[in-house]
Amino acid sequence: MILGTGSSAFIPKISGVELEGVFSLKTLDDAIHIKKFIHNNNCRKAIIVGAGFIGMEMSEAFRMRGIDTAVIDLLPRPAIRWDPEFSKVILEELTRQNVIFSGDTGMVSIEQGKDFRLRLNTTKGEMEADMILIAIGIRPNTKIANDIGLQIGSSGAIQVNFSQGTSKEGVYAVGDCCEVYHRVSHRWVHIPLGDVANKQGRVAGRNIGGGTMIFPGVVGAQSFKLFSLEVAATGLDEAEAIACGYFPVSTIIWGNAFSRMLPGEKRLGVKLVADRASGKLLGAQAVGTIGAVSRINTLSLVLWSGMVLDEIAYVDLAYSPPVGASWDPIHIAAQELMRKL
């Protein structure tokens, strides 16, 4: 038996979340219902609760439809996983696109509005809108797993091994409902991403079909697009590195996505986190209008192979002025960080 029960959007237990016009976004049906509601009700204003991946991507989707959009979050800045310097760039992009952001703001209740359909009561006052999207995270669906006595990991998701087998013989789990091994932290974690689920499904299928296959894990690569920005990260940040027993040191550099010989600047920020003791790369982040995701993909391979900074500082990368400088931002960031070890 394979469990692929996925995950569900987390909805807080406050009054009014059941009202028409209050949505979460987890499935295709959710997306279809949101789109129909916008069309049928001529929505002019939306509130997004949560400034993570879904909140950021949906702020763009709403603005592209001409809907006035506000985002609130309990945390002080959007995309909290990224360094404050990068979060500032994300906030600037939101402001440039007329998305209002309010940090340190929590939901209290939802009720019928006066000037708009709904009123959201928050810890900082009242807000009204035609619709409210709650995007404050997900939870793995483990009810069946609990009912049949499967071991649940410390992350709250189903515990599996490298073959996707659970604690019971003949029972496998894949996707958002189960854990995955993180190759940098060396811990089993919950990373509910579609590409991870797809790979886990293939591994489980191969093993059930009589073959032998393992899923070697992840390094935590992830990204999202926000209007003109690419935002990406991989591996660990400083806090995560400390929790895993490392001694992190980090640096941020601002460079150009391609050669400065060409007209037009494409500003690109790259952050590297390394272990002070070993010089091994632990994580990376990037933000820019172009080139952020490609750098993080490269640095994910660096993490996968366990390279150290002095190797990264001179690694052979394809050079051509239209796509990159002779000294790539990856090289420059690695050399800068080496000086801090």
Image (cartoon, rainbow, N blue to C red):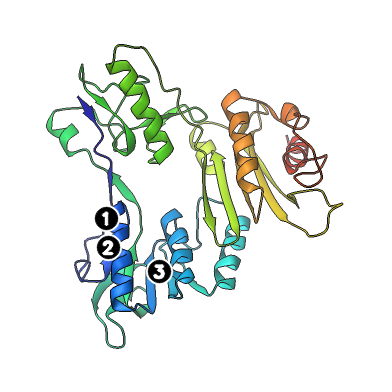
Disc 2: which residue = 33
Residue 153 in picture, x, y percent from top left: 30, 31
Residue 134 or residue 107, whichever sits in front = 134
User: What is the C-alpha distance between the residues marked 3 and 2?
Assistant: 27 Å
Residue 214 higher or lower than 76, as above or below: above
The answer to whether 103 appears left or right of 175 in the picture is: right
**Callout in the foreground (3, 2):** 2
**Dot 2: few (<14), some (14–19), or many (≥20) neighbours within 10 Å?**
some
Q: Could you say whether the residue bearing mark 3 is in a helix, strand or loop?
A: loop
| Residue 105 numbered mark, or none | 3
Question: Where's residue 306, x and y in %?
Answer: 61, 24
Q: What's the amino acid at mark 1? A: Asp
Left or right: 275 with respect to 217? right
Local packing at callout 1 (Cα closer than 10 Å; few below 14, some 14-19, many 20+) is: few
Badge 1 vs badge 3, beta-carbon distance below 8 Å: no
> What is the CA distance from the residue labelled 1 to the residue labelled 3?
29 Å
Of the residues tagged 1 and 3, which is closer to the observer? 1
Q: Residue at x 28, y 78 (%)?
A: 118
Screen quadrant of the N terminus: top left
Q: Residue furthest right?
A: 261
Position of the C terminus by quadrant: top right
Indicate which disc residue 29 carries: 1
Residue at the image position 32 percent from the left and 70 percent from the top: 132
**Amino acid type at image mark 2:** His
Q: Is residue 51 above or below residue 308?
A: below
Q: Are marks 2 and 1 in contact (CB under 8 Å)?
A: yes
Does any portion of residue 24 appear in the rendered image?
no
Mark 1 / mark 3, whichever is N-terminal: 1
Q: Could you tell me residue 96's position as x and y percent?
A: 59, 72
Q: Secondary structure at mark 2?
A: helix
